[in-house]
Amino acid sequence: AQSVAQPEDQVNVAEGNPLTVKCTYSVSGNPYLFWYVQYPNRGLQFLLKYITGDNLVKGSYGFEAEFNKSQTSFHLKKPSALVSDSALYFCAVRDINNNDMRFGAGTRLTVKP
Amino acid sequence: ETGVTQTPRHLVMGMTNKKSLKCEQHLGHNAMYWYKQSAKKPLELMFVYSLEERVENNSVPSRFSPECPNSSHLFLHLHTLQPEDSALYLCASSHIPGQRVNEQFFGPGTRLTVL
């Protein structure tokens, strides 16, 4: 079965600095990869996804993620962090052959002014 | 805002109570999901419904009973819960595989506290 690892519980960055939130995955076939964000007292909101094609995927709010097949990674990035980006970020993977989405444990991003 | 609504948003219940969580989606999707979110744990997929049929039940205790009367509505019936069942319960919906690559859209969740 597919699985996802988010190795960092917490990431702290200063406003204006670039940010990276890490994600590695394991899947038997080709993966579909997703990033979601969760603000306090809210459900998860879809940010971006990788299906096929260009390894660099651009999503909402200036976020992007790079699919690296050899490293089985799908790190989330943003060139310049905002305080309002502070939230809980989830990486998820789905095998193309089923509808079973597996989520990581989440990484709490804190952007300090 | 996301097209998936959940009620109630907060629920406190005793271990002997029976209650139900409701989810409704207005996105024209035909697959719906229940997840359990506990602190510092990955989201736990509980149930999956595709075209109103349950296609996945991930070893969830029988004190949780899902119901999907149509493609827009999903319920989670609760009875004789335990304190460790306290969590945020999230509903999601999507298109089924084969129609398109389908990200899931989530509701705001129900914060459940079992006393």
Image (cartoon, rainbow, N blue to C red):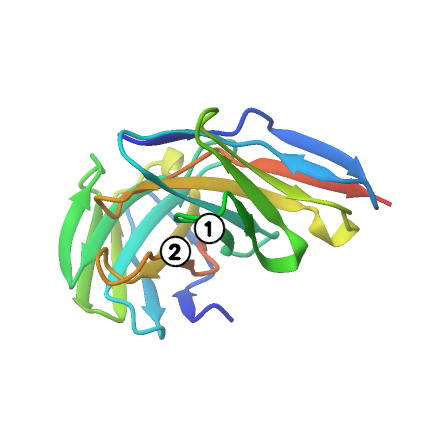
Residue contact between numbered discs 1 and 2, judged by CB atoms under 8 Å:
yes
On the picture, is B114 further left or further right than A85? left
Residue A21: x and y, percent? 62, 35
- In the picture shown, does residue A48 fall above or below A30? below
Of residues A25 and A108, the one nearer the viewer is A25
Name the mark on residue B12: none
Q: Chain of mark 2?
A: B
> Do marks 1 and 2 both belong to one polypeptide chain?
no
Q: Quadrant of residue A9?
A: top right
Which chain letter goes with mark 1?
A
**Residue A58 visible from this viewpoint:** yes
Quadrant position of the C terminus of chain B in the picture = top left
Residue A100, by quadrant, is: top left
| Residue sitting at x 29%, y 51% | B17
x then y, percent, for residue A95:
29, 40
Residue type for callout 2: Glu
Q: Disc number at residue B103?
A: 2
Q: Identify residue type, mark 1.
A: Lys
Q: Is residue B101 above or below residue B45?
A: below
Please say whether residue B113 is visible from this viewpoint: no
Q: Is residue B18 above or below residue A27?
A: below
- Please tell me the numbered disc located at residue A49: 1
Outermost residue to the left: B53
Q: CA distance from mark 1 to mark 2?
A: 8 Å
Residue B67, above or below A88: below
Residue occupying the point 38% across, 43% down = B36
Residue B91 picture location, percent across and down:
36, 56
Q: Residue at x 23, y 55 (%)?
A: B97
Residue neighbourhood size for the residue with mark 2, other residues' Cα within 10 Å, grouped as few (<14), some (14–19), many (≥20) = many
Work out whether residue B81 or residue A21 is closer to the camera in this orientation and state it: A21
